[in-house]
Image: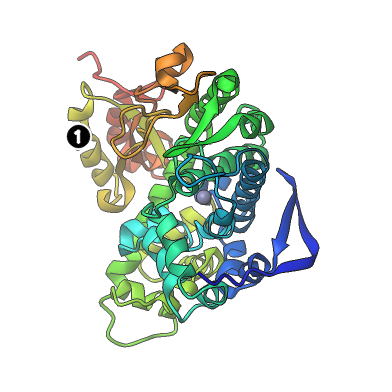
Amino acid sequence: MVNNIVSLNKEKVFRDPVHNYVYVKYQFILDLINTTEFQRLRRIKQLGTTSFTFHGAEHSRFSHSLGVYEIARRISERFTRSYATKATGDGLWNPAEEPVALAAALLHDVGHGAYSHTFEHIFHTNHEQITQEIITSPTTEVNQVLTQVAPDFPAKVASVINKTYPNKQVVAMISSQLDADRMDYLLRDAYYTGVKYGTFDLNRILEVMRPIEDGIGFEMNGMHAVEDYVMSRFQMYQQVYFHPVSRSMEVILDRLLLRAQEIFAKQTETTPDTPYLLLPFLNHEFNLADYLQLDDGVLNTYFIHWKQHGDSDLSDLAHRFIDRKPLKSVKFDDNTQDLLPKLRGLVEQSGFNPRYYTATDNSFDMPYDAEKPNEKQIQLINPDGSLQGLADVSPIVRAIADRFSGDNRFFFPREILQSSANVDLFQPEYDEFNHYIKNNQLIHPKE
Ligand code: ZN
């Protein structure tokens, strides 16, 4: 293979609040950062609607991507210094893998779009597929930079992202239970939200990390640092990622896009309020260039226009999203879910279309899933070289492994719990609705 890897005359650094500095020594990495597709990530917030709850969380996919690159760079540097391979098949690190690992780390989220998860839900896009397309399509600047390294380089980088790359150490570096991606987003999201429990000792983890035969392992004496990482992930899910207000704003966004699709996909003629940049998605005929034109600002601009739209559901949902008017929510479980049709009926009687103003959502996620078929346990390395799964050794991790940590919620307009100008009109519905809710929980009231 002819690799065209050129080092910069002088190392380039990017100042970063989480890692202090991000170091770039290769020309092609700098060129990738300067592509139009990568610069677009500056205009997409890493945490979407979470900033409605934690106002500091305005950081972008751009800064996260640089952070993942920097962690991968440090891992590769350390592996090269301490664990470089001496003979094929010795299970150690091959320093020649560094360029592909760094490129994959930098580009792993390049296909993310504005408000990714909700957008994907309504318009059936897939950011992982689009990431690979940006890397392999000859139409992108990213692909042109990668092709200059070697003609087969784009395909290699894409195969790291879809986990088919033959070197499992490179794949584990970018996507596994303890990888550069998760370590960066936990530290970065904790920093920008301002919470104090998302932190863990990154330096210590990097110090005990080692290449193993089919991936990456951690020396046994670093177990406590690894436990701390698992706990921090658990806490961040509980306290930040699953926050009911952020989820409620996500529900509003979902219904806003749904209503927009119902209205604009039917229109045969364009009008001044036609959302031109969204049309390819409303009609399910989009290409890569259409996708790359979208960002948070484009969507927010349409939402601001829609606040004045003649359709009262569309304009009201746009107002609720732009002006942060979250829905209320209550927890429900197997014992109380039979009440949901009743509550939806009351919402409808109060003048709200339940299609747009009610939702159920569950946030279940495993903080550390020892059994997920395609995700291996974190491997600890004993002094004699034998391996043990983290959950088999750590009582703390075992205690939270496989435990459901989320909840089921029912969302509804908060107006139905508050007296308002409409109170005379809907008083019976308010009274009945409140009857079922106590301390933020859905209950069966005593008759
Ligand atoms: Zn990521």
* Residue 420 spot, x, y in % from top left: 44, 41
Q: Nearer the viewer, residue 41 or 416?
A: 41
Q: Nearer the viewer, residue 95 or 56?
A: 95
Which residue does the image show at 79% across and 61% down from the upper left? Answer: 11
Q: In this view, does 437 lie to the left or right of 225?
A: left
Q: In which quarter of the image is residue 291?
A: bottom left
Q: Nearer the viewer, residue 136 or 269?
A: 136
- Report whether residue 313 is seen: no
* Residue 68 spot, x, y in % from top left: 59, 49
The local crowd at label 1, few if under 14, some if 14 to 19, many if 20 or more residues have their Cα within 10 Å, is some
Q: In which quarter of the image is residue 26?
A: bottom right
Which residue does the image show at 35% across and 60% down from the upper left? Answer: 126
Residue indicated by mark 1: 342
Q: In this view, does 42 lie to the left or right of 12?
A: left
Where 140 falls versus 393 (above or below)? below
Say what amino acid the circle numbered 1 marks. Lys
